[in-house]
Amino acid sequence: MNRHRAEQRGRRAETIAAWWLRLHGWRILARRMRMRGGEVDLVARRGRMVAFVEVKQRATRDSAAISLDQYRLRRVAFAAEQLAPRYARPGDDIRIDAIFIVPGHWPLHLANVWLG
């Protein structure tokens, strides 16, 4: 698949994930935050919780889970550390979540996937 089509699929998956989060009471604070050394697909808030979310779209849940490796999680964690002062307030809890987008299934939201 060429890069342009992959980019379109990624944006569509992020849009689906953002709507899923909104339907579950989250407010989307930012999308596609990229910086040197890391990136975050979505930044969301619900109450005192700020989540930095990695979105993975794959053909199966197993392939989505495999694609969420330690390298990618470290990149999200690095970006979250840099972005937290911008989006979190004193007393907020911060975590890194993942959402898997798989055709024919509801999005799967995994909370607190990074414990590093």
Image (cartoon, grey):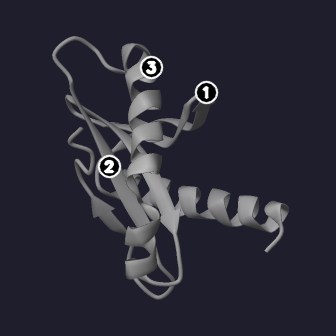
Give the amino acid type for the residue marked by disc 3 in the picture: Gln
Q: Quadrant of the N terminus?
A: bottom right
- Of pointers 2 and 1, the one earlier in the residue sequence: 1
Q: Residues within 10 Å of mark 2 (few under 14, many from 20)?
A: many
Q: Residue 79: which numbered mark, if any? A: none
Q: Is residue 43 visible?
A: no
* Residue placed most toward the observer, 75 or 20: 75
Give the residue drawn at x 20%, y 42%: 115
The label nearer to you, 2 versus 1, is: 1
Regarding mark 3 in the picture, which secondary structure is present there? helix
The answer to whether residue 47 is seen in the rendering is: yes
Disc 2: which residue: 97
Describe the element under mark 1 as helix, strand or loop: strand
Query: What residue sits right under mark 1 in the picture?
Result: 35
Instruction: Tell me if 74 is positioned left or right of 103 in this view.
Output: left
Which residue position holds label 3?
Answer: 82
x 48%, y 57%: residue: 55
x, y (%) of residue 84? 37, 21
Disc 2, SS = strand
Relative to 68, say whether 87 is above or below: above
Tell me: residue 60, above or below residue 79: below
Residue 78 is left or right of residue 33, and the answer is: left
Of callouts 3 and 1, which one flags the residue occurring earlier in the amino acid sequence?
A: 1
Residue at the extreme bottom of the image, as rendered: 104
> In this view of the protein, which residue sits in the foreground, 38 or 43?
38
| Residues under numbered marks 3 and 1 in contact, where contact means CB atoms less than 8 Å apart | yes
Q: Nearer the viewer, residue 83 or 107?
A: 83
Residue 13 in the image, given as x and y percentages of width and height: 57, 63
Q: Residue 11: image x %, image y %?
A: 65, 57
Of the numbered discs 2 and 3, the one sitting upstream in the chain is 3
